[in-house]
Amino acid sequence: MHVNGLGTANCETAGYMAGKTAKRALQSRFLEAASEQIPHKERDYDEEAFESVGANAPEEVKRAWMEAAKEIGANGLGIGKNGMMTHISQMMVERVERGWNGGNPNDILGNSVQSALRAAKQALYDLDHPLAAGHTRSIEVQQCRVQERKFYQAFIRRLEGMR
C-alpha cells in the first residue's frame, strides 16, 4: 500500500523492484561487473578437440597435435576454428564406435606416444580406405577430408620424430 510515495514500512518506493525483476537486474549488474574484470579468452578448439580424444595422452603427444593443427589449419576431429564441425572425421567415427561399444570415447590416443601413433595411423588408413566405396561427397567435405589427411600425416611425422 502506498500513501504519498511512501510504502507500508514508511520507505520510499522509488526504484523498488519485486521478485524476478529485481533478481534479473541484480544478475545483469553482476555479469556486467564480472565481464569488465575478467579478460575475454578466445577458445582454442584445437586444444578442445585434443582433450576429447587424448584425455590420458602425455604432454608430448598434445604438443605434436597442437603443432600439426597449427601447421595444417585443421585438427583430427574435424572441428573448425569457429568451433563448428566441418565434417565427420575418422577420429569422430572412432569416438562414436567406442562409446557405442562401452569404451572410453575420450581416450582414442591412449597414454603413450606409441598408442597415439597407432591411433593416428589407423585413422589415416580408414580415411584412405572407406568402407562405403563410391560414396558421393560434396566438394566442401572432400576438401575437409584432404585437410584431415594432411593433419594425420603431420601428426604422425611429429610422433615418429619422438621415438
Image (cartoon, rainbow, N blue to C red):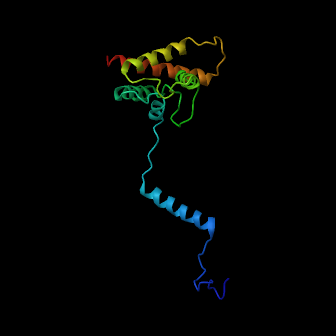
Residue 147 lies, with reference to residue 30, above or below; the image says above
Label total for image:
0
User: Residue at horizontal 42%, vertical 57%?
Assistant: 37
Q: Position of residue 81 (x, y in %)?
A: 50, 35
Residue 83 lies, with reference to residue 150, above or below; the image says below
Residue 92 lies, with reference to residue 122, above or below; the image says below
Q: Position of residue 22 (x, y in %)?
A: 59, 67
User: Residue at horizontal 42%, vertical 52%?
Assistant: 39
Assign the C terminus to one quadrant of the image: top left
Assign the N terminus to one quadrant of the image: bottom right
Query: Residue 94 or 49: which is nearer the viewer?
Result: 94
User: Residue at horizontal 53%, vertical 36%?
Assistant: 83
Picture quarter containing residue 59? top left
Q: Position of residue 10 (x, y in %)?
A: 59, 86
Picture quarter containing residue 61? top left
User: Residue at horizontal 50%, vertical 18%?
Assistant: 149
